[in-house]
Structures are given as C-alpha cells and as structure tokens.
Image: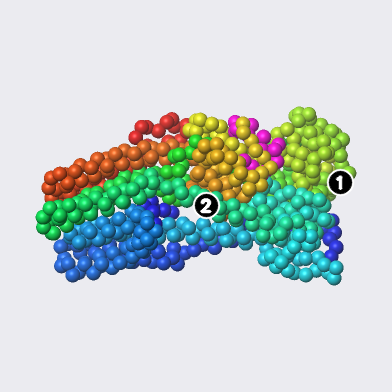
Amino acid sequence: MSLHVFLYGAGVSSTLDSPPVPTLDASARTAPRRRTRFLALPEARWALLATATFLSALPLHFADAPGWTYGPLYAIAYLAGGWEPALEGLRALRGKTLDVDLLMIVAALGAAAIGQVLDGALLIVIFATSGALEALATARTADSVRGLLDLAPATATRVTADGEESVPVNRLSVGDELLIRPGERIGADGRVLDGTSEADQATITGEPLPVLKTPGDEVFAGTLNGTGALRVRVERDPADSVIARIVILVEEASRTKAPTQLFIEKIEQRYAVGVVAATLTVFAVPLAFGADLTGALLRAMTFMIVASPCAVVLATMPPLLSAIATASRHGVLVKSALAMERLGEIDTAALDKTGTLTEGAPEVTAVRPATGSGLDEDALLALAAAAEHPSEHPLARAIVVAARARDLSLAPARDFTAKPGHGVTATVDGRFVTVGRPDSGLDADTDAEADTDAEADTDAGTDTGTGTDTGTGTGTRMDRDTDVEGGTVVRVERDGALVGTLVLADRPRADAAETAAGLTALTGTSPVLLTGDNPRAAAQVATATGITDVRASLLPEDKVTAVRELQRAGRKVLFVGDGVNDAPALAAAHAGVAMGRAGSDLALETADAVVVRDELAAIPAVVRLSRAARRLVVQNLLVAGTFITVLVLWDLLGHLPLPLGVAGHEGSTVLVGLNGLRLLRESAWRRPDEGRPRAL
C-alpha cells in the first residue's frame, strides 16, 4: 500500500432489399458495464470497520468518558485497519525492504504505548482508507478490461460444405468462412468474400461513421455489422485479433506506469530506514551510558513521534486533493493524487480526433441546389430529409436534424427502401426521390451537372468517382473521397434527375483550437494529432485547430507506438481520447484524459482524469491547476522538513517535553494542511481566456 490516496444457407446475397434496421447508438459501441462494488472488496470492509469504530470513539474520548468506554473501540480500529499494512510491511521486511507502511504502523503503536492513542488510530484509519481506495481503482480497471472482451461475440456462424454451424469464436481458425447477418457483431478479424454492408468500427479505428464493406475489405472482431449480410474469411486467430491486442496493450501499459510515484514515495525507503535506525540509536545510546529504561524509552518514543512523516504526508496530500476538488467543481474528475501530480508534469500533448477534437457525429455543413432544379436550400434539405426520415443511419439522422433546426416541414415518405452501398429511395409528394447513389454506374460527370449556386468548383464536383463508396445500410451513401472541406458528399435525385448535393462533416468542437493553443503555451510544443480516421479528414481538423503534427489511419497499437516514441525521446506525454481504441494510449501515456459524455467504459476507467462535460478548454486549465498544486507541495515539504528538523534536534540535543513535541508535530501537520487547502479557492481555477493563474 502506498502513501498516496486513490480517489478514486452458405451463400450470401450482395444486397438486401428490406433489411432489418439496427440502431447504431453509443451503447452498441461499448462493452457491457460490469463494475466491482466497493463493499465487495475485503479491504473496503476492513477500512469501513476501522473508520466506524474510530468515529465512535472520538466523541467519548473528547467528552472525557472513562477509558473503558472508548478504549475497546480504538483497539478494534487498530486491528481492523492495521493488520493488513502490518502484514505487508513484514513481508517487505522479509524481502529486505523497509517501507513507510511498516514505519507508520510502528509509529501508531508507539504513540499508543505512550498514551497518544488518538494519533495512532488516526494514522491507522488513513492507511486503511488509502488501501481500500487503491484496491477499488485496481478492480475497476480490471472490470473494464474484462468488459472489453464482451465486445466480441461468444459464437459465430461458420459456413461449411454442409451448410452452417454455430461455433464458439475461440474455436475459429484462419481460413474459416463466417456468415455475418445484419446487426450482428463480427466474430473475428478477416476479409470480406461476398456481400455488401457497412460496419461501425469506431471501437477499433475511431472513425465516426460506419464504413462500407465490400469483397476484399478488412473487417475487425467486435465491430457491428450494418444492414447487409457478409461472408468473411478469418485471417487472424481470435487470440491475436485487434480487440484482443487492445486488452494486452492496456494491461501492459498500465503495468509500465506503476514505477512512477509521488515524490514522498521516492524517498520513503531511505526515510523509513533512517528513522528506524535513529530511533533505535536514541533508545540504545542513553541506555548504554546508564540512563534509566523509562527515560530512554520516552525519549525514543518522542523522537519517533516528532520524526514520523505525518506532516510530510499531509504536505503532499492537501494540495493535490484540494486541486482534485476544485477540478471536479469545474467538470474534471481526477481519479487520484498521483494522477493530479502527473498532469502537472506533462510537456507534450497528443490528441485523438473523433469525439475528442470533434463532436463525434456528422452535421450538415452545406446545402447546394443544382442549377435549374427549381429548389432553394430549404426545399432541397426538406426533400432529402423526407426521404431519409425512416432511416436510422447517422447521416440520415443528421439530415433530419438539420431540417428540423430550420423548422422545415417534412412530407411523408412512402415506399421507402434502402440498399447497402447505394442509398435510400422513397416516394415524396408523388415524386421518386433518391438520396445517395442508387445507380452504381453514376460517375463523376453527373456531379458536374450539379453546378450549384455557390461554388461549383468546390462542392460535390470534387468527387472524381475514384473514391471508395462507403454507403449506408439504412440509407445514405458515404463517399470516402470527400470534398475540399473534408465533408461527406450526399447526392439527391428527383425522378432520376440530380437536384443538388448535401455535405456533411464531423465538426471540430467550438473550443478545440483554443485548447490546442493553450496546450501549446503550457508545453512549449504543438500537440500531436493521433487518429484512426483517414488522412484527409485528419488534415481538415488539424487545419481548423492549428495542429501541425498529424498522424492518421492508426490502429490502437499504432497510437501506443507513437506515444512511446515521444516518451523515448524524453517527453512526458498527455494523451486525450474517448474510445476503446484510445484506451491503450491512455494507459501508456504519462497522463491520460478521457472525454466523459461519449467516452467508452474502458477509456473512462483507464484514463487518469475525465472531462465530464466534454469541455476541451478544461484540459489546459487542469494542467495549470496541477502545476500550482505541485508548487504548494514543495512549499509544504520545506515547512514540514523545517519543523521535523527543529523538533528532532531539540529532542536530541536538549530535553523536548513529550506534550510540546506532540504539539509541534501536530501544529506542523495542521499548518501544511491549511496551506494545501488554498487551492480550494475559486481563483485557483483559470481558463485560458482568463489569463495566467495568480502565483501561489
């Protein structure tokens, strides 16, 4: 236990005319939540018992009740909260290591031996609570890693010469052929042999929209199939799938962070050895020169009390915990004192794109009627929204939302149909309307006919026809070859004639550029953009936010590699992300921050801090707050060290009365504690547009 406190048939048709329509919502992108309850941990139950008995004894003690009324309660608190750290300390001692845990137990027992039962019980309760919270943090992380495995289905439909069979995914072999029905999760990494559909693979690549899958395309285990049926050949053993490698990467990266500790823990071994040796010397030397046993023991116990690291512990904790409390009031949950300390140490920032720098959902950014169509922007948008209204696809929902935002009236759609990779068709006001690409023979020349009222040279005409169609299963066609604005082009036809185009894009957050600039000012270097999305989309967001170092098309292990390359170059990296695919990088980074609203369970559990309201500007603010806390820690350590030095010298060179020693020890503890609470002031939090924080 450490001194820091954790807060914390065999054939598959290529298209389906009337497919079932799965809803690709956020819940489909994350693993089921299986969380360990706090009281399910034995450490938590022991800590609760120690705390309850300690609090029960306090009023009796201060009321000068007879000792027999509160003495047994203190004894239970000592036993309940102290047996585990004492056992761990003895085990460490057996391994020839002396830590502060054992020293604090000895100090608590020594305090009780000379009548300072309350001080000793308080130390015991602090240690027991710290251990319980640390055990909870470890269990919750393990829960999330196990939950990640639930993304992959337990069984898959294997195609054989005799038909189909359902088999556990762990029995799949490279070369097996699988049938993936609409709405099912893909059981293994592989390649499409037959069929057309789209896959929501945000958990793997972070791409905000479902991706078209046609013969020859790669698919990943755990991703969600859309409305088409696919036949897939397994190309990786299930144990070596991308989703399985994410689990391994998270576990390995989490272990690599363990050696980083709070400052006090870096010196605890030497401090503990020194105090024990000094205490024994203070006891033995006077005894050897004829001092009486009681006097020598009293001096040694006084020395143990004044030299104990209570003030040093509180020198570290109050500033960090106050910073945690202030950050939480402003929507940033920092999970531990260690995490708060790490945030102030970073000198490089790396950011995910989708759901982090961007909103993570498409929006209509341009409505462009074709010349001669007779439609204005509102009429074109209303026509497209009416046809898309029955669809559940993210692009379709974005079109409908845009129409409603303009208070447009949508005519009812009849005879709605959807084909994966092509789009939707419907009858609206007696006219046959197509949104997407119903005719696969439609080429770039058709785009040229859609000379819009605004700028024909920068709209859908940039779709050269060479891009990969990533059409939707429930509706809209998505052109992977986006226009110069980084958006997705959607074509609208009426009775076979092109009447206009819509452009949809995943917009950067309003405070994305401000955050990038704030992090640049804090670290001295521009943030790095790490994304699984395509290079063009990444470049568009980077331009909008002022980021110059862009790395796109990254799988989860590639993000980890990028973070570790920066750290091998001597950088302390802050990584900000939101998805399952970001979890390994969050774990590998010196400090990780997850976006709270859209963040996956694994990302939220792996990160050191969570931005609850998805306000990016809070990230540089919490980094500055952490640096202020670190300055207060240094101040407090100087104060605590001064008090300990003076009291120890007084005890060694003169005669320090025990009451005065206790008063000095407790006084220094209170002083550093109050100094650390200064970060609870509202002025301790500063946003980038509010200027630099006041010196503390």
Q: Which residue is mark 1?
A: 440
Which quadrant is the N terminus positioned in? bottom left
Q: Is residue 90 above or below residue 592?
A: below
Which quadrant is the C terminus positioned in? top left
Q: Secondary structure at mark 1?
A: loop
Please name the amino acid that badge 2 sits on. Answer: Ser
Looking at the picture, the colour scheme in use is rainbow
Q: Is residue 130 above or below residue 40?
A: above
Please state the horizontal and vertical placement of residue 683, each as a whole percent of the image: 37, 37
Question: Upstream in the sequence, badge 1 or badge 2?
Answer: 2
Q: Secondary structure at mark 2?
A: helix
Q: CA distance from mark 1 to mark 2?
A: 48 Å
Please state the horizontal and vertical placement of residue 223, each as a whole percent of the image: 69, 55
Residue 9 visible in the shown view:
no
Q: Kindly check if marks 1 and 2 are in contact, taking CB atoms under 8 A apart as contact.
A: no
Numbered circle sitting on residue 254: 2
Which residue sits at x=13%, y=45%? 654
Q: Is residue 220 above or below residue 207?
A: below
Residue 175 visible in the shown view:
yes
**The residue stretch that appears in magenta:** 530-547
